[in-house]
């Protein structure tokens, strides 16, 4: 049985038992968009592509400032894609924060 490609996919360096490498890449299939999410304090001085700043929460529930960088896209209307990526990142972060072993369990079982 062929399964549909998910609308949003995480492309990053998560491995069981390791810390993320500080990068979160996401691929939005319908618009062929590759985005990277970094902490706002990363200090990116100049970037030619579309960006969006947004607020999220860390595992302790404290607010954090993040930035979405669009590395490539095939759409001219990027705002709805920003919305989807921002929402997807929050949901993924909430899921990972739901338990110490949530990500390890998911990777091991999928």
Image (tube, grey):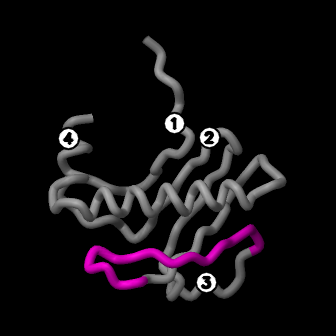
Residue at figure coordinates x 26%, y 64% from the top left: 97
Q: CA distance from mark 3 to mark 1?
A: 30 Å
Q: Do the residues bearing badges 2 and 4 touch, measured as CB atoms within 8 Å?
A: no
Element on which disc 4 rests? helix
Where does label 2 land, which residue?
Answer: 29
> Which residues fall within the magenta stretch?
48-63
Q: CA distance from mark 4 to mark 3?
A: 35 Å
Q: Would you say residue 52 sits in the magenta stretch? A: yes
Residue at figure coordinates x 52%, y 59% from the top left: 87
Circle 2 packing at 10 Å, graded few (<14), some (14-19), many (20+), is: some
Q: Do the residues bearing badges 1 and 2 touch, measured as CB atoms within 8 Å?
A: yes
Q: In the figure, residue 18 lies in which quadrant?
A: bottom left
Residue at figure coordinates x 56%, y 40% from the top left: 7
Q: CA distance from mark 1 to mark 2?
A: 7 Å
Where does the image place residue 3, in percent across and percent down from the top left? 47, 21
Element on which disc 3 rests? loop
Nearer the observer: mark 3 or 1; the answer is 1
Where does label 3 land, which residue?
Answer: 44
Q: Earlier in the sequence, mark 1 or mark 4?
A: 1
Q: CA distance from mark 2 to mark 4?
A: 24 Å
Where does the image place residue 12, in percent across and percent down from the top left? 42, 55
Q: Earlier in the sequence, mark 1 or mark 2?
A: 1
Q: Which mark is residue 6?
A: 1
Residue nearer the viewer, 81 or 22? 81
Question: Residue lying farthest top?
Answer: 1
Please give left or right for residue 34 compared with residue 93 in the image. right
Q: CA distance from mark 1 to mark 4?
A: 20 Å
Q: Which mark is residue 54?
A: none
Where does label 4 land, which residue?
Answer: 108
Q: Would you say residue 17 sits in the magenta stretch? A: no
Element on which disc 2 rests? loop
């Amino acid at each position: 049985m062929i399964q549909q490609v998910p609308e949003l996919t995480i492309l990053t360096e998560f491995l069981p038992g390791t810390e993320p490498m500080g990068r979160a890449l996401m691929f939005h299939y319908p618009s062929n968009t590759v985005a990277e999410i970094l902490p706002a304090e990363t200090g990116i001085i100049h970037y030619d592509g579309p960006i969006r700043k947004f607020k999220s929460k860390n595992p302790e529930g404290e607010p954090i400032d993040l930035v979405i960088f669009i590395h490539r896209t095939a759409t001219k209307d990027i705002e709805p894609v920003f919305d989807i990526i921002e929402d997807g990142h929050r949901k993924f972060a909430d899921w990972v924060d739901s338990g110490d072993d949530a990500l390890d369990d998911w990777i091991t079982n999928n």
